[in-house]
Structures are given as C-alpha cells and as structure tokens.
Image (cartoon, grey):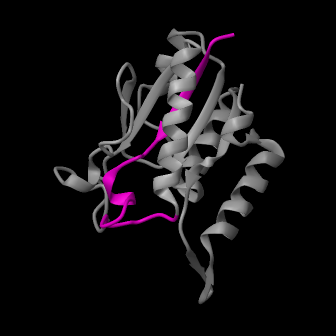
Amino acid sequence: MKKALIVIDIQNDYFCGGNMELEAIDDVLIKINKLITFAKDNGYSIYIIQHIMERKGTSFFLPNTVGVELHEALETKDTTLVTKHYPNSFRETNLQASLEKENLKELIICGAMTHMCVDSTVRAGFDLGYDITLAEDACATRDLVFNGHVVGAKDVQRSFMSALGSVFCEVKSVKMIK
C-alpha cells in the first residue's frame, strides 16, 4: 500500500540563529532528507508542512521573515507544500482532503517540534483513522520549563515518544522504517 511522508515545520527559525532554536536540528534535517529520498524511491507522496504564525504575541514563524521560510537544505523537489496556522497539521488545511484523494491511510511523520506540532499532528491523525509511524530520530524539540524546573530536550523527546508510541502510533528510528 502506498504511504505518505509528512514533514513538519523544518523552517529557519528552528536552526542556529533562529528565534526558536531546537536541539540537534541539523542532525534531524539529515535524517529527514534520508526519509524523503526513501519515500521518493518507494513512490510515496510527500507533504511538507510550513507553519505561518497568525497569533498575536508570537516570536517565530512570523509572516514575511526569513525565519518562516523552509530551510534551504530541506529536499522539497517533487513534494506538496501545505501551509498551516495551528500546531495540528490537519486543522484548517487541505492535508486530510489531499490524503483522502490519494486514498492514503498510512503515514510516516517527522519534523518539529516534537512536543508541539508533531504531537498534535500524530494525535489528530490517529483520531482521523490513519496508521502512523513516527520517525523518532527525525524529530526535534528543545528544553522546556515546568514549575520552575528545566526539563532537558532529551527527556522531553523520550517522554513524548513514549506517550505517543503507547497508543497513537508506532515509533521507529529512520533506519527501521520500511
């Protein structure tokens, strides 16, 4: 069965010098490009999600800035761009309609941020009935603060992968995705 690869928010603001730098994002980008090559080699549809913030008071992914642009090293040739304004890539976008048009029910998801847009998209996709594989080492996050305590990015990543993998998707490394 044909699958779709969903690549979420690989945009300049998440990289060095951006307004919301993520841990190990450069390594994640390399793995995402490997997934894109794999998807192309296997005839999968590839959807690149780009987040453009419309909410007042936000500091990244602002319209008409360099930070909102897709990273120049992201392989975008022969892919479909989907623009979103919320963490959930399905909300008020054409993603679900596009997947339905192609009769795609199996998704591979990767991107950023693990604790926000990746999480929201995986959970929404599950609720919509998709069979999801999450490429854990092709997702990036950052340190978070909770009740005055810093939760390191590695712990954030582990927590979200374990929660998502318990019900909503199958969690695999890029090299295990087939």
Which region of the structure is painted magenta? 1-23
Q: Tell whether position 75 is magenta.
A: no
- Residue at point 35%, 23% (across, down): 77
Magenta stretch: includes residue 19: yes
- Identify the image quadrant of residue 124: top right
Image quadrant where one finds the N terminus: top right
Q: Is residue 15 visible?
A: yes
Q: How many marks?
A: 0
**For residue 160, above or below residue 111:** below
Residue at 55% from the left image edge and 16% from the top image edge: 41
Q: Is residue 1 above or below residue 47?
A: above
Left or right of 137, for residue 28: left
| Quadrant location, the C terminus | top right
- Answer with left or right where residue 18 lies relative to residue 178: left
Judged by its main secondary structure, the magenta piece is loop
Q: Nearer the viewer, residue 56 or 13?
A: 13
Q: Position of residue 153 (x, y in %)?
A: 60, 69
